[in-house]
Image (cartoon, coloured by chain):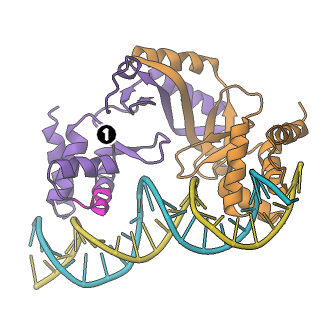
Chain colours: A purple, B orange, C cyan, D yellow
DNA sequence: CTCATTGCAAAGGATTTGCACTAAT
DNA sequence: ATTAGTGCAAATCCTTTGCAATGAG
């Protein structure tokens, strides 16, 4: 699927409910939907500033909120003290591995885990709604002594 | 192992480094070490107030910090927007199931998961340092319509 | 006595909100 | 024109910190 189509989906989402398609919203959407990264609000703002797009902090947060409501972006909390956001794409549910040195994130899906989570919850008297696994470790690059940013 | 012994361990920890054994520290330690709960700082403060123990917010946080440093208490972040603390006890590493309605937490250990986490990390080029699985769901009580606090 | 702790209030970091102003439709 | 979005600053929430007063050893 062409990534660009995601931007169109977002435009469609906005039009459907008569919400203005503003350059700020599109700028945030492009970063989140076209790049394979897990951005924090602050990273988004910094990246936009670097690209010469002027967007206030409040607007970044509001754009994120709209994107999350549209279902095109999902929120993540890796316990870093702030949240990250990534494209929802087509991948159903997946887990994350986070480098504790450079913050690089990779994702993967594991069917066994899906089943185990539901079973484990049930065995404790809970009905599973969702789950989240984050594996913390050191990535290749950081172990080799040439850390990069995520 | 007698739970009370944990309090003595904490006293010993403090004495060893010539730190004052204050009633505030002991009060926080008793809640964290003698009860099977995952307290937030705010819950600790509220519970202490209810028991008539007067402890300021700052002191609660500082007592927690000391307990974590002693190794007797561990910090948890379930992505709720605040942290929780629980006794480190003897249980090695374990996972959590959190009720999204009442906040009740139950824990369990699963060997398969321990192995899987290391393998999964390795397959992505990471060396696992730790991991964390939180399963979100509804507990028995909440499903039955009689929610309780954790 | 001496030094670390305590309480209070101010400071911080991430995120949200109120409001006058600007822009999309 | 309308109505929602935007920027800015103030406000929140959780947690930390500065500092004078207090208490443990």
**Relative vertical location of residue B114 with respect to residue A30 in this rendering, above or below:** above
Chain under label 1?
A
Residue found at x 60% / y 48%: B83
Q: Which residue is identified by label 1?
A: A88
Q: Classify 10 Å Cα crowding around label 1: few (below 14), some (14-19), many (20 and above).
A: some
Point out residue A135 in the picture as x, y percentages from the top left corner. 49, 27
Instruction: Answer with left or right where residue C14 lies relative to residue B91.
Output: left
Q: Main secondary structure of the magenta part?
A: helix
Q: Nearer the viewer, residue D14 or B95?
A: D14
Q: Residue D20's x, y, as percent?
A: 69, 72
- What is the magenta range? A55-63
Left or right, B107 with reference to A145: right
Quadrant hosting residue A24: bottom left
Q: Is B1 placed left or right of A45 in the picture? A: right
Query: Viewer-proximal residue, A73 or B88?
Result: B88
In the image, residue B119 lies at what x, y percent?
49, 14
Residue B146 visible here: no
Question: At 66% from the left edge and 27% from the top edge, which residue is drawn?
Answer: B93
Residue B19 drawn above or below residue A147: below
Residue B136 is left or right of residue A63, and the answer is right
Frontmost residue, A3 versus B101: A3
């Amino acid at each position: 699927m062409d990534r660009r189509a995601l931007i169109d989906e977002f435009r469609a989402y906005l039009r459907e409910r008569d919400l203005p398609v503003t350059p700020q919203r599109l700028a945030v959407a492009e970063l989140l939907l076209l790049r394979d990264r897990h951005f924090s609000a602050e990273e988004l703002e910094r990246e936009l500033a670097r690209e010469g797009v002027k967007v206030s902090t409040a607007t970044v947060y509001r754009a994120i909120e709209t994107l999350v409501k549209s279902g095109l972006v999902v929120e993540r909390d890796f316990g870093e003290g702030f949240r990250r956001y990534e494209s929802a794409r087509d991948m159903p549910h997946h887990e994350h591995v986070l480098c504790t040195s450079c913050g690089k994130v990779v994702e993967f899906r594991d069917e066994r885990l899906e089943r185990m989570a539901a079973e484990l919850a049930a065995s404790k008297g809970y009905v599973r709604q969702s789950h989240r696994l984050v594996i913390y470790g050191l990535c290749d690059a950081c172990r080799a002594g040439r850390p990069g940013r995520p």
